[in-house]
Image (cartoon, grey):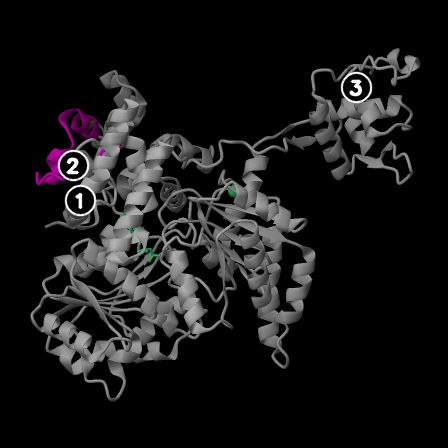
Amino acid sequence: MTPIQALHKYFGYTEFRHQQEAIIRQLLNGGDALVLMPTGGGKSLCYQLPAVLLPGLTIVISPLIALMKDQVDSLNINGIPAAYLNSGQNNEEQQDIINRLKAGKIKLLYLAPERLFSSESRLVTFLKSLPISLIAIDEAHCISHWGHDFRPEYLMLSHFKTEFPAIPVIALTATADKLTRQDIQDKLALQNPAVFISSFNRPNISYTVSPKKNNYQQLLEFLSIRKDDSGIIYCLSRASTEDLAADLREQGFTAEAYHAGLDNEIKARNQEKFLRDEVKLMVATIAFGMGINKSNVRYVVHYDLPKNIEGYYQETGRAGRDGLPSEALLFFSAGDAFKLQRFAKVDGNEEQSRIMLKKLDDMVKYCQLQTCRRQYLMHYFNEPFPEHCGSCDVCLTEFKKFDGTVLAQKALSAVTRLNQRFGTTYVIDFLRGSKSEKIREEHKQLKTYGIGTDVSKADWQRYFAQLINQGLLQVTDDQYPVLKLTDASEAILKGNQKVEFILAEETAMAAEIQTPVYEGGLLQDLKTIRFNLAMNENVPAYIILSDAALLEMATYLPQNMNELGNVSGFGEVKLKRYGEAFLNAITNYSQQHGLSSQMSSKRTKPAPRSKAPRSSSAGTTQRESFDLYRSGKSIAEIAAQRSLSSTTIESHLCSFIQTGEMNVAEMVPQHKMQPIQNAAESYGTDRLAPLKEVLGDGYTYAEIKAVISWLKRDA
Ligand code: ADP
Ligand code: ZN
């Protein structure tokens, strides 16, 4: 079985994400790998899929028992035999697992690090008697002092390479910085590891910062249109998590609090309720979240200012693991920043204080940005990113900037004509040529009267606010405030300087990723079915199927098992076990509402790769173009000679980049490679137009197409 076939069969997915395929190949070839991928990027699959394909056992080291259970449940439900050993199990349970291991009936074994190498542990000796194929170390940054989550027991993992010298090791983390990365490599003694660094961008999360004013009211508004969604609200103090959770419950939300000061039992119970969708809202300190694998968290709110970008990014990253559009909302006040400054100062450690204050400062800068927030975040993690993401609050507003010079001139001359003696309302009525008797007769005779009739009152109000903000007008402090010119006004009136206006309301073009039109009633039915199945299996709902899979079904309405198998997330085993329950609901609903299958409009799964030799996979007309190109002709010349468009010739050449016969460098300068790759990772490769838009004029369609072909090249 090839990796792509296994992906389809066991996990029900159509394509690999990020560099999953290359990582998997590295392991199947017996090499070590270090994988840096953002939260939700799909790290687990990088070792779970090889584990299925390799003959022996895969050992997975993971720091959190809760997470292990989740992963093992998920694997078993997909028909992959997996188990974990931990101190919570009784002798009998442990013995059962050991027997199954001896019989070769388990493909993946999850362990906490301290179980392995502690002095009295005989586990290593036992494991050595088994055929081990692969060792995976999750949350590998825990081995480093430089990471934000050092765990001393992880240091014991350095014994792996001495105890199991010939077994490939894969280390995975979502922490990107260089120091930590090097430390992981050294401490684990990875041998010549292939290092895979994915883009840290999370394109399905949109970022918004809102002034912390009436924030409770703002929060209620935000939540009121997300009543069915799960979300996390982070607060700074333990007390405020409990207060806020209580307030929200009073408003009719299902909310629980979580912080380190609660009893373990309460913590576990609240977390479980959240995982199982019995509680939609978790109000928590940052103690909550590590290892929370819940894929349908739709939003993360920071009710207070986070201390640094690293933490903030990790916390927001808990939203949208299923790839559906999700929100990150932060309330910012200068007061919060001031408060945190005091915390940041560590007595007697100047160096530490300096670093913490610098990190806080970077966080504050993020909140005060006038430029794309995603770009700032990506640059913070040393990753290039274009100027506009199109889905943060700044981009959404900025997209509508326009040249407002003429409007500004009209406004300023109205103020001048009225001798700087009237307030905004009067000036706007005057500009709009109001017939009202409130406008003095002599003013109705002026040339400026009515020169702004084409602009609505509301829009004029926004433009005046911006003129004031930009210092081009000022408002007096009097009881009846009037508009006055400023020193800067003259240059505008004389036409020596331009003015830019922003349209205040947000554009809907927001995210490229938009939720498709789906059958709401059906989605509810499907959720109920999933909920019941989850109860029966005693697992959280998202382990049965992700929200994304339900949404797909409610959108494309598959009408038979075959079509259902093409829904993302339905591997063979899941299809057999649960397919019918969902299918019945869909066909019933469709009949009642006179609907039919829309599966043909869903992107189809790629056909299994042909076994044909590479060179034949590009056709003859393509080859003709390629041969001409090889003979030294330019694309334009070939196009002319063959009476085809240049675009067609470019596509022909790209097919040879994909087969590996042509080097991508022939079509794309080196410095453009990475930005195009990043854009492709962030926005997908289905449509070129959005990529062209983010990359800008410096990039041609041909270059973008070439890099995409290169990314899709046959392995
Ligand atoms: P990470 O450990 O990197 O935070 P996970 O391994 O939990 O991320 O994966 C996040 C989600 O993405 C999971 O629901 C997983 O099933 C899903 N996923 C992983 N790889 C793919 C893929 N190739 N196609 C579709 N979904 C995927
Ligand atoms: Zn942006």
Local secondary structure at mark 3: helix
- The picture places residue 673, in percent across and down from the top left corner, at 36, 44
- The picture places residue 411, in percent across and down from the top left corner, at 78, 24
Mark 2 touches mark 3? (CB < 8 Å): no
Residue designated by label 2: 561
Q: Which of marks 2 and 3 is in front?
A: 2
Q: Which amino acid does label 1 sit on?
A: Leu
Ligand 1 within 8 Å of disc 2? The answer is: no
Q: Please identify the quarter of the rendering in which residue 659 is found.
A: top left
* Magenta span of residues: 603-627
Q: Which amino acid does label 2 sit on?
A: Met
Distance between mark 2 and mark 3 Cα atoms: 66 Å
Residue 622 horizontal side relative to residue 374, left or right? left
Ligand 2 within 8 Å of disc 3? The answer is: no
Residue designated by label 3: 431
Distance between mark 1 and mark 2 Cα atoms: 8 Å
Local secondary structure at mark 2: helix
Residue 268 horizontal side relative to residue 6, left or right? right
Nearest to N terminus: mark 2 or mark 3: 3
